[in-house]
């Protein structure tokens, strides 16, 4: 169909009119976003203010974004990531409401879990954490100390952390520490799937389409998914077992578990459904293992790569644990200043979650360094830039436990900026458990064994890519030759 056009003196089709309207709409939206948006005065690339495809490119296509951004400038006031989100680079003292789960729902879920992750509960379940540590040491002594073969230490730590968190969750582990060579298919698959997190975030339709496909087609397209399916099925079965034994004291586990506590909580019945709890369990299990593995990977490399740090740590451990086979007490380890400093520095350089953590102020205008951020706009901040702020952490790329050994006031100030576990109401729920695991594992491994790096360099502890979790340049992690310490 064509319409007469007195303006141009020629016939114009409906399609051309629609194309013109679309073009005008694009021009109008683009002009508004770049020049008239409430955020238009904030510095940053105008292309990012124009479209979220800018963020898509750097998240999905450019895997070296973190390194290039870090090298460019640490102290930039802010940068655009898309038309509705700012990333603040540098110190950020503004509190925002999270844009993940709704605040009210998150609050009641967290209330049910908080008691189980308290320091008193961690102390009560300390023997079960020690049990996993002893199993790790036993496997190492049996299979590595006398055979003169390298130990993939980061792998072993990942298996330890996964067994701890499943014991903690269900009262039963999946025995990853017994895997030959500590090669857990699950950890490998989780690492692979983590590499797809940005693609799935920007294009959620891919996940929806994949979920709608028959299982055999999903496995054909993504072979590793069969392991993930088996894992999720195992998690769901454990949740069902805990739910089935609910109310029968001692019928399933020998101690309290996360999910037995949830079932006994005053959460609404909808929050106790098997499907919902299975999803919660998968998140807890993966989150509860990755942070430990990454932080311990950084710690072990830098300890073994620096004889001064290594000798100081061993001397402190020998003083408090004169017998190499002594089982340490948590309070005993928490009192060791150098061990604590090493853990703080390891958390700083392993970052926790490296992706920006967006927050929204629901009703108030936020003032930040002369810029007004209106309600409803997301502001993102990531631990990487916080932890490499040279004004807070001089020589920030260097592993220096000594920076945490100053006077109490200076140490407290540094701790405010170590946000590996985040801050505020969305702070990592398992922080106390993570600290307990790191205290025990570092103390036990470095007190009982002598180690030297094997085919390992600084790339194993150098951040390469943001895939929500940090991915290091050398993904195999720390590898060592190991033998028993004589005394």
Image: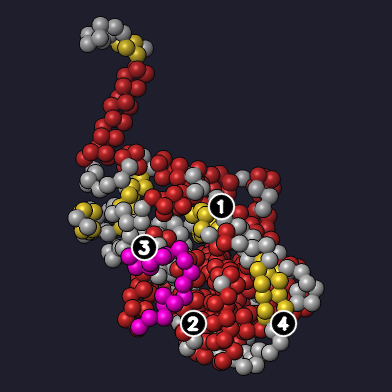
Viewer-proximal residue, 298 or 358? 298
Q: Which residue is mark 2?
A: 338
Mark 2 → mark 4, Cα distance in angstroms:
23 Å
Task: Choose top left, top right, bottom left or bottom right for residue 383.
Answer: bottom left
Secondary structure type for disc 2: helix
The image shows residue 23 at horizontal and vertical percentages of 32, 26
N-term-proximal mark, 1 vs 2: 1
Residues under labels 3 and 4: Cα distance? Answer: 40 Å
At horizontal 27% and vertical 40% (from top left) the residue drawn is 33
- Crowd tier of the residue under label 2, counting other residues whose Cα lies within 10 Å: few below 14, some 14–19, many 20 or above: many
In the rendered view of the protein, which quadrant contains the C terminus? bottom right
Q: Disc 1, disc 2: CB below 8 Å? A: no
Instruction: Tell me whether the residue at label 2 lies in contact with that at label 4, contact meaning CB atoms closer than 8 angstroms.
Output: no
- Mark 4 secondary-structure assignment: strand
Vertical side of 363 occupied by 285: above or below: below
Q: Gap between marks 1 and 2, in whole Å?
A: 35 Å
Q: Position of residue 484 (x, y in %)?
A: 72, 82
Estimate the x, y position of residue 254 in percent, counting from the top left: 62, 86
Tell which circle, 3 or 4, labels the residue nearer the N-terminal end. Answer: 3
Q: Which of the two labelled residues, at mark 2 and mark 4, occupies the earlier sequence position?
A: 2
Label located before the other in sequence (3 or 2): 2
Q: Give whichever of discs 1 and 4 has the lower sequence position.
A: 1
Which structural element holds mark 1? Answer: loop
> Local crowd at mark 1 within 10 Å, few (<14), some, or many (≥20)?
some
Tell which residue pokes out farthest to the top in this image. Answer: 9
State the residue at coordinates (22%, 57%): 369
Q: Crowdedness of circle 3 by 10 Å Cα count: few (<14), some, many (20+)?
A: many
Does residue 199 belong to the magenta stretch?
no
Compared across the picture, whether 464 is left or right of 104 comes to: right
The magenta stretch spans which residues?
Answer: 390-407
| Residue labelled with disc 1 | 195
Residue that label 3 marks: 389
């Amino acid at each position: 169909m064509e319409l007469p056009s007195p303006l141009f003196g020629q016939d114009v089709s409906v399609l051309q009119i629609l194309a013109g309207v679309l073009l005008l709409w694009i021009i109008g939206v683009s002009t508004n976003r770049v020049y008239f948006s409430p955020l238009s005065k904030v510095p940053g690339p105008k292309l990012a203010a124009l479209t979220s495809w800018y963020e898509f490119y750097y998240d999905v296509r450019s895997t070296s974004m973190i390194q290039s951004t870090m090298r460019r400038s640490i102290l930039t006031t802010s940068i655009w990531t898309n038309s509705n989100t700012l990333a603040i680079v540098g110190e950020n003292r503004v509190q925002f409401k999270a844009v993940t789960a709704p605040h009210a729902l998150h609050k009641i879920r967290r209330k049910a879990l908080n008691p189980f992750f308290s320091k008193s509960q961690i102390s009560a379940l300390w023997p079960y954490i020690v049990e996993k540590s002893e199993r790790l040491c036993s496997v190492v002594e049996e299979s590595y100390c006398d055979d003169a073969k390298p130990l993939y230490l980061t792998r072993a730590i990942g298996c330890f952390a996964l067994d701890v968190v499943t014991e903690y969750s269900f009262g039963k582990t999946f025995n990853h520490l017994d895997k030959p060579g500590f090669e857990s298919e699950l950890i490998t698959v989780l690492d692979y799937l983590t590499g797809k997190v940005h693609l799935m975030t920007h294009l959620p339709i891919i996940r929806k389409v994949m979920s709608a496909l028959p299982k055999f087609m999903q496995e054909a397209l993504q072979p590793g998914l069969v392991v993930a399916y088996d894992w999720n099925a195992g998690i769901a079965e454990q949740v069902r077992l805990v739910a089935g034994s609910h109310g029968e004291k001692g019928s399933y586990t020998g101690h309290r578990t996360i999910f037995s506590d949830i079932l006994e909580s005053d959460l609404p019945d909808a929050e106790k459904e098997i499907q919902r709890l299975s999803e919660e369990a998968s998140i807890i299990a993966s989150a509860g293992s990755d942070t430990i593995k990454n932080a311990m990977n950084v710690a072990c490399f830098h300890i073994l790569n620096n004889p001064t740090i290594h000798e100081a740590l061993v001397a402190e451990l020998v003083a408090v644990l004169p017998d190499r086979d002594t089982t340490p007490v948590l309070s005993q380890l928490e009192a060791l200043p150098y061990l604590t400093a090493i853990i703080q520095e390891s958390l700083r350089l392993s970052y926790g979650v490296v992706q920006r953590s967006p927050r929204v102020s629901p009703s108030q205008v936020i003032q930040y360094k002369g810029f007004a951020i209106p309600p409803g706009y997301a502001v993102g901040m990531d631990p990487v830039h916080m932890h490499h702020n040279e004004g807070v952490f001089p020589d920030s790329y260097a592993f220096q436990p000594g920076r945490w050994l100053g006077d109490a006031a200076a140490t407290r100030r540094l701790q405010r900026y170590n946000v590996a576990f985040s801050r505020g109401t969305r702070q990592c729920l398992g922080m106390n458990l993570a600290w307990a695991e790191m205290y025990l594992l570092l103390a036990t491994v470095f007190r009982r064994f002598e180690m030297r790096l094997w085919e390992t360099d600084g790339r194993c502890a150098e951040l390469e890519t943001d895939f929500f979790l940090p991915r290091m340049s050398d993904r195999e992690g720390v590898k060592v030759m190991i033998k028993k310490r004589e005394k």
